[in-house]
Amino acid sequence: MLTRLDLRGTSDDALADLLPPVATDDEGPRAAVREVLEAVRTGGDAAIRALTMRFDGVDVADTRVPPEAIVAARDSVRPEVRAALEVAAAGIEDFHRHQLRPPSTYSRDGILITGRAQAVDRAGCYVPGGRALYPSTVLMTAVPALVAGVPEVALCVPPGPDGEVPALTLAAAAVAGITEVHRVGGAQAVAALAYGTETIRAVDVIVGPGNVYVAEAKRQVAGEGRVGVPSAFAGPSEVVVIADDSVAPDLAAIDVILQAEHGPGGRAWFVTWDQAVADAVDAAIGAQVAASPRRQDIEATFAAGGRLALVDGPAQAAAVANRVAPEHLEVICAEEAATEIVGLIRHAGAVFVGPWAPASVGDYLAGPSHVLPTAGSARFGSALTVADFTKDIHVVTMDRDALALVGPHVAVLAEAEGLPAHAESVRRRLAAPR
């Protein structure tokens, strides 16, 4: 079912020309997103309503979900589902609390600098809809924001066919402690969060995964300087599975499938240096996809982004993974090979090692956010963290002696740059009587 690539005997430098690129530069989505952003910027709530009717087929007169409906949803889900949400939320919170940084101090020659991570005032979290429900994304975006100290968190979720946000998604919002939820999705949700409307107040940061239109919308509003957006491109889901003959073919197969079932636009790769393993896993994938209730979505992903790569060994497997820079990387190999591969990995959103650590655990409750870099952006981006909701503020204090020590250098550099007022601001202070 996967398109085969025989990379054996290929040098690392040649891999870039042989591996298929990710199509993220299509003018179609860019132009469509620009149109939506401008409509919401100028039309506010009326534009949101019209766009929701156009794209989701439902008329939503008021985007805001009543807070009491959020609480009611939490109480309506099955006890075991609520318990699982609470366990996941607790693990995510505990992990992200370890990312918090205490205030720092630095001193040198009378210069004292104190630094602190200051949370933004308001954050927007986007949660996808459509092909599946994503209460896990509610937790993976909202909980880190709250841990970071953001006082206001707004959640945007596409409405279902009935015009409402699914109860399971609302239940996750209640478990996370979110009281502001809006039934709006797509690029129009990003626009509402960036520009603000009569109902949805603008935010400082927008986070969360989505389709190519959502990801492009975030990129465009960030480019306008409207809001902060994590540098990673959080688009359609991806996985690369590297395995040898130490793993059962059906386990490797299901792990290739698990991210592909999100639907088209993503990538699903299997990499091995064993021809027999390649054949066995490919056959297992075919059998499992044929029986899957999400067969159509999986096959759509495989058609454009499914690959089976045969390589020379562990080192080349790592080289392929680094070239792909996947959102999820699984290394299911014997210990020696796994250790070698993990040591060589430079570009991946999250790495899962061994037969007992499938990427699905990371999607729900391992602790780190499952909002990860896609489309090769793991080369420079990383998972969503509390740092995405904060900014560093530095407070500098000096006494006269400290200024006397560094001031002449400041003046020289200022004059060299042609900025005399900069130099004069130091000289006047130092010339003043004590």
Image: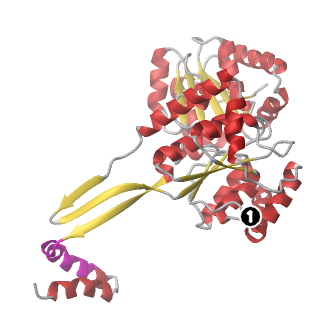
Q: Is residue 374 visible?
A: yes
Q: How is the image coloured?
A: secondary structure
* Image-quadrant location for residue 26: bottom right
Q: Main secondary structure of the magenta part?
A: helix
Give the image location of residue 287, x and y in percent.
80, 16
Q: Which residue is mark 1?
A: 37
Q: Residue at x 57, y 24 (%)?
A: 312
Q: Indicate the amino acid at tag 1.
A: Leu
Q: Nearer the viewer, residue 140 or 286?
A: 140
Residue 43 image offset from top left, x and y in percent: 78, 69
Q: Nearer the viewer, residue 53 or 167?
A: 167
Q: Residue at x 59, y 16 (%)?
A: 244
Q: Secondary structure at mark 1?
A: helix
Magenta span contains residue 411 = yes
| 4 lies left or right of 291 | left
Q: How many residues crowd around disc 1 within 10 Å: few (fewer than 14), some, or many (20 or more)?
A: many
**Is 327 contained in the magenta span?**
no
- In this picture, which residue range is highlighted in magenta? 399-413
Q: Quadrant of the N terminus?
A: top right
The residue drawn where x is 88% and y is 55% is 54
